[in-house]
Every structure is written in C-alpha cells, then in structure tokens.
Amino acid sequence: MAQKTSDLVSGLVVIGFALTLYFFLIPNFVASSEHGAMSPQFFPFLGAILIGLGGLALIIASAFRNDADAGSNKSDFGVSKFVLALLVAAAMAGFILLFQLAGYFYAAPPFLAVLMVLFGARGPLIIVVTAAVTTAALYAVFSLGLNLPLV
Amino acid sequence: MFAELSAALDMLLSVQNMVAIFAGVAFGVFMGAVPGLTGTMGIALVIPLTYAFEPITAFALLLGTYKGALFSGCIPAILINTPGTPAAAATVLDGYPLTQKGRGGEAMGIALWSSVIGDVVSTIALIFGAILLAQLATKFGPPEFAMLVLFSLTIVAGVSGDSMIKGLIAAAVGFIFGTVGLDPMMATPRFTFGELSMLNGISLMAMLIGLFAVSELFIQAEVSAKSISQVVVPKAQISLAKLREKLPTILRGSAIGIVLGSIPGLGATPSAFLSYSEAKRASKTPEKFGKGSLDGVAASESANNATAGGALIPLMALGVPGDVVTAVLLGAFLIHGLAPGPQLFAENLDLVYAIFIALMLAALMLPVVGLAAIRLFSRIVMIPRYILYPIIAILCLLGVFGFNSSPTDLWIMLGFGFLGYGMRKLAFPLAPMMIGFVLEPIGEQSVRQALTISSGDWSVFVSTPISLLFLALTVLSVAFIARRTLKDQKEAQG
C-alpha cells in the first residue's frame, strides 16, 4: 500500500477511534460526579482529543506528502503476509482456548507442532520430538522450577 | 552509607545472584546476536521467569540481559553486515569492511573491549549521577512530579522514528490504555466494561509482551528463510598496545554515550552515530572511516554500551525511562512492587546499591560471556527458525499466564500483539505507546494531587524553581526537536 494512502486511511481510523472514545466510550464507561481536571473523565477526554488531533495532523501531512519522499517509514501490508500472521495468531488463540478448557499438556504439543509447520518445519519426526521435549522442559521450568502452576 | 553498602553486598553476593547475572548476560548476548531478536524482547521474555525470584535476583537477571544485548548486536554487524540491534547500526560501517579484509577477529576484539570499558565507565557515572539526582528529587512534590512527567513525555519525540505525528498518536493511545481500571483519586471504574479483572487496569506484562514480542512473531512468520544465517567466526583478539592506542576514542565514546543516554529519548543508536562522527572528526586518518577503521568500531561500540548507565540515571533517580529498554525495565520494577525514584533511594538504599553492584558485575562478566558468544555465534544463528520462534511463542504465553494466572491476560496479550503488528506494518512506533501507558498514572495522580492542594489553581505548576526548571527543559527539548526535524527535512530535500 502506498505510504500516502496508508497514512490517509490510518488518520481516518484514528479519528474514528477518537470520536468513538469521546462520544460513546467515555460518557458510557467512565462515571463522574466532578467537573474539570478533578473529574475521572478529564484525562480520558484529554487523551481522546490528542488522538483526534493526531489523526487530523496525519491526514493533513499525508495530503502534502510526496510518496517518493516516504523513505524508511513506508508501510508494508500484503494479503499473503497478513494471512501467515493471522494463522500464527489463530494458533495462539487456539492454545489459549485449549489451555483454559483442557490444560497445558493438551494445549502445548499441538500448538508447538502447528507453529513449527507455520514457521517452515516439514519433518514429522523433528516436529513431534521438539513439541514433546519443549512441552516437558517448559513444564519443568515453570511448574516445578519456578512453582508457577500451569494446570 | 557504609552500612547500606555492606547490606547490599550481603544481599547480592550469593551463588544464586551470580548465576542470575551470568545467565542474564548470556541470554542478552544471545538475544542481541540473533538478528530480529532484540534486548527489549529479551527483557520482556525474561520478566515472567523472575516472578518467583527475590527482587535483587530478578534485577540481576534483567540487567544482565540488558547489558548482554547491548554488546552482542555488534557480532552480526561485524560478521554478516547485519546489526543484531539498531544500536549496532554504526558498527556495520567499519566492522564488516574489517571482516572482508580478514580482520574480523581484531574488529570483534576491539568491539568487545570498547563495550566493556564503556559499560564500566557508564556504571560509575550512574552510581554518582543517580545518587545526586535522587537527593535533589526528595524535594519533589506533586507539582514538580507533574512537570517532570510533562518533560518526560518529550522522549516520545526521540523514540518516534521517522514520523513524530505517529509517535504522538501512539503515545496518546497508550495514555488512554493507562486510564483503564480504577481512577487513582476516587476509585471510579474506567473502561472496565463490568469485568472484575479489569479493575486493576491493563496488565503491564500482557501489554509489554504483546506489543514487543508477539508482534515480532507475527512479523517473523512472514519471513521464509530456514535459519537466520551461517557464518565462519574468527577468534576475537586485540593487542594491549592497540587497545591503549584506541583508549581516547573509547573514552570519548563513553562520555557521549553517558550524556546522550541520560537525556530522555535519545538512546543508544544516536549515541553510536554521534560518537562515530566525532571519532572521524578527531581522527588523523578520517579517510579510513567506512573502509575498515578500528576507531570507527571502538567509537560506536563504546558509546552504545555507555548509554546503559546514562539511561539508568533518570530511571533510577526519578523513575523516568530514558529509552525503550528502560521503559520495559521500569515495567519490570513495577511488576516486582518497586517504584524507582527518590523514595526507592530513601527506603531501599541497600537494594539500590545492590543493583549498582550487579550492573558492575554484569559489565565485568561481559568479556567472559562475550568471548564465548563470539565463538558460539555460528551455531546460534544456525538454530532453525521453526524451532526458535515456536519456543518464543509459548514462552510469551506461559510467561503472561504465570504472572496473574489469568486467561484474560492472555487474550489481552494477543490483542496487543495484533495491535503492535498493525502499528509496525503502518509504520507507527511502539515505544511511545508504552511510554504513554507507563507515565499516565504517575502524571494523572500528580496533576490531580497538585490541583487538590492548590484548590484548583493551575499556577501551582509554575510556583517552584524545580517546576520552572522542568518547564524550561520541556521548552528547550521541544525547541531542540523542532530544530532537528527541520534540519533533517532540509537535508532530505537538499
């Protein structure tokens, strides 16, 4: 995506977020009986205003930007790349669900195996051995060594 | 003072703590030496392992990691033309040409010893600087702290990368995340959405690991290489005579690193480049720079390592992080129930001294670990990515869960991972968000306490010399940043 376009879209999203905060989230989810700087709403409102102004500045700056000057600040979104990241995120989400429902020993080996495949592993033996050894080793470190319960 | 020093030595000198420092340095060296992994990520990964430790053991491990990573960024920079950390970018300029000329061993040797000397000098500066600054800070009340936080926010500009606007947006979003939970004065719930687990606010740990480590995993998932690199590593060696010859460059670099490191927002990378350009300016053979000059390597490595001590001065004395890594370290301190600043010096001076001694020991262990790491490097970088990154992923998950045993924190971490990924893809910097998040509660509490004391009179913020000093520093800092930005723009156009 061109830097100019991505900055424009980012600016619009940021402004949308600021408006949601200002008109919906803060009035509904931050109670207040005080006014001015002593109110619990004061700092959230200040943050929302700063975010909105930042978004506006980003849109204005992108309007005057020449894409040839974008330099190292260029955005880097691609659908195929995004799918890979999404799959890693889905695997992590799957681990969290399985960890909550069934426990560490049911969640960790398949999670590690899936991630190894996503990161390029192809040999079934290395995948199985690494997943099993890592699961046991991390259990030993966290649960037995550091006394942090995993199940 | 001697009683506290003795107590500090008692606290620190145990096998457990020595192992922690050594392991920290070794892990930090590993994180810095592998391109793509960073010291910040290393510290974020180590924090969960420290929950069960005594605070001093935890800090020994964390500070060792910090020091190790700062050094080892130079290893891939010199050997494979790829800086392991951004701070080692200036080292590439002369380090890699030296390797191409068959002088990689000399380059590694000068890099190692410059780093050690820079580290030791900056730790001494930290000890004296932090104690003096902390004594001054005991005179701070809420208005002074509020103005200090305002000044600290100028560091956002320094860690914003190419776009200050995006840095400010990220900081403001972090600021909003900082308001989640019970409000500090009236205990009114804010953005908790009826969830009891949100009353304490967003878990710093979940945010930190999500933003810095999980987002990196998503980025790495896109890379198709099988392993990071493969290289034959020369033996690091430098003669004493050559080291003595480079000492002025190393000491100059150390001084630059300390000064720039202690200014919030500058950090290791600009220090290394400034030191490099100063060394070139002072050199009798400036034409050799960029083609394989040992002075170039010595200048950049001494400066980037010396920033550690410099950046820790405002962190330890005022509780203000000087750069991204110290912002993460501040998180680690808070997670262990300790707030750096004058109170820490007043109430836990023995712990402060123990931390300083641990830093010095970490610097002294660097040659041992560094020499071994250089030899091991060819093996480290051959670890297949499909083993390295899945292990990092599960370490992130277990680390965050271990902190509060809260599955909610895991979802928050994943959310911040995605947010961090999106921000990086759209070229938004992550560090300002972290800084906004950490500074919001301190700033809000100070402002509201000051206004309570003054019955709502805003002039309380300019009523004392210290407040005025911080206001002046803020104005000067903004003016400096504006001047630098304009200069950069002119250079880009020219």
Image (tube, helix red, strand yellow):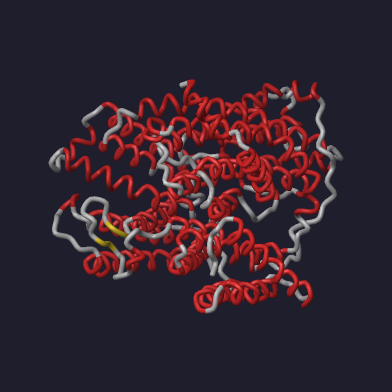
In the figure, B144 relative to B408: above or below?
A: above
Q: How many marks?
A: 0
Relative image position of residue B342 (x, y in whole percent): 38, 32
Res. A118 image quadrant = bottom right
Q: In which quarter of the image is the C terminus of chain B?
A: top right
Relative image position of residue B200 (x, y in whole percent): 34, 58
Q: Which residue occupies the foreground of this view, B41 or B60?
A: B60
Locate residue B439 relative to residue B219 in the image: left or right.
left
Relative image position of residue B265 (x, y in whole percent): 47, 41
Q: Residue sitting at 46 percent across and 45 percent down?
A: B333
Q: Which residue occupies the foreground of this view, B19 or B62?
A: B19
Q: Which residue occupies the foreground of this view, B304 or B473?
A: B304
Q: Residue sitting at 43 percent across and 42 percent down?
A: B155
In the figure, B137 relative to B176: above or below?
A: above
Q: Which residue occupies the foreground of this view, B493 or B124?
A: B124
Q: Is residue B431 visible?
A: yes
